[in-house]
Amino acid sequence: MGLDPDLRTGVVLFGGYGSPAMLDIARLLDVSENNVQLIMLCGHNEKLASDLRAMKTKRPMVVEGFTSQVDHYMSLADFFIGKPGPGCISEALQFDLPLIVECNARTLPQERYNADWLSEKQLGISLNSFQEIASGVKSLLDRANFPEFQNNARNYSNRALFEVPI
């Protein structure tokens, strides 16, 4: 796949249709001092996947369209970047991945609490805008922070499936 085993890897996922924010995230992280590589999961958005594939980046970037192997890509990552939807958060935590999400007026009202919750539980970072992604990644991966975020994600036990009334 061309990934460097010595670099931290972020998986970027915004559901089944991706998001134009993924282009900004890729550009901003590529010019930042953060030494990270990205796995971009674009879903059914082939134009987005094509635009990302056309980018010339300093560090490795894997771009995938719709895939049934999200679990495989998550298993290769060290952290998650995406929307604060319950599915995205749950999947990332299943793979012990600390998260970076955005929460602002454009965030779906029902997802805003999720962003607050992951910050409160120290499972990741909530940004006001993905324009702040470089500083968010720097903060998440800081040697003083990352082990705690990683440990909290690893120790989180999602029991919701077993608590749903039948």
Image: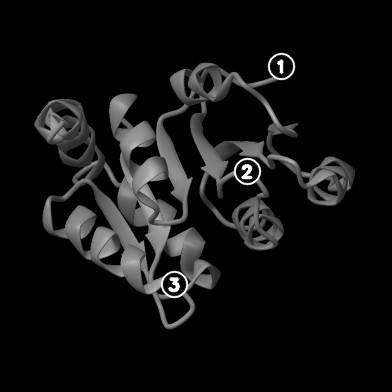
Where residue 102 appears, as percent x and y from the top left, is 42, 65
Q: CA distance from mark 1 to mark 3?
A: 33 Å
Q: Residue at x 13, y 30 (%)?
A: 159
Residue topped by disc 2:
16
Quarter of the image with the C terminus in it: top left
Quarter of the image with the N terminus in it: top right
Q: Amino acid at mark 2?
A: Gly
Q: Residues within 10 Å of mark 2 (few under 14, many from 20)?
A: some
Disc with the residue nearer the chain's start (1 vs 2):
1
Residue topped by disc 1:
1
Disc with the residue nearer the chain's start (2 vs 3):
2
Residue topped by disc 3:
107
Q: Residue at x 43, y 41 (%)?
A: 80
Q: How many marks?
A: 3
For the residue labelled by badge 3, is the local secondary structure a helix, a strand or a loop? loop
Q: Is residue 2 left or right of residue 159?
A: right
Looking at the picture, tell me which residue is in the foreground, 6 or 65.
Answer: 65
Q: Residue at x 84, y 44 (%)?
A: 46
Q: Residues within 10 Å of mark 1 (few under 14, many from 20)?
A: few
Q: CA distance from mark 2 to mark 3?
A: 17 Å
Q: Residue at x 31, y 40 (%)?
A: 98
Q: Is residue 127 left or right of residue 143?
A: right
Disc with the residue nearer the chain's start (1 vs 3):
1
Q: In the picture, residue 120 is in which quadrant?
A: bottom left
Where residue 115 appears, as percent x and y from the top left, is 29, 61
Q: Amino acid at mark 1?
A: Met
Q: Amino acid at mark 3?
A: Thr
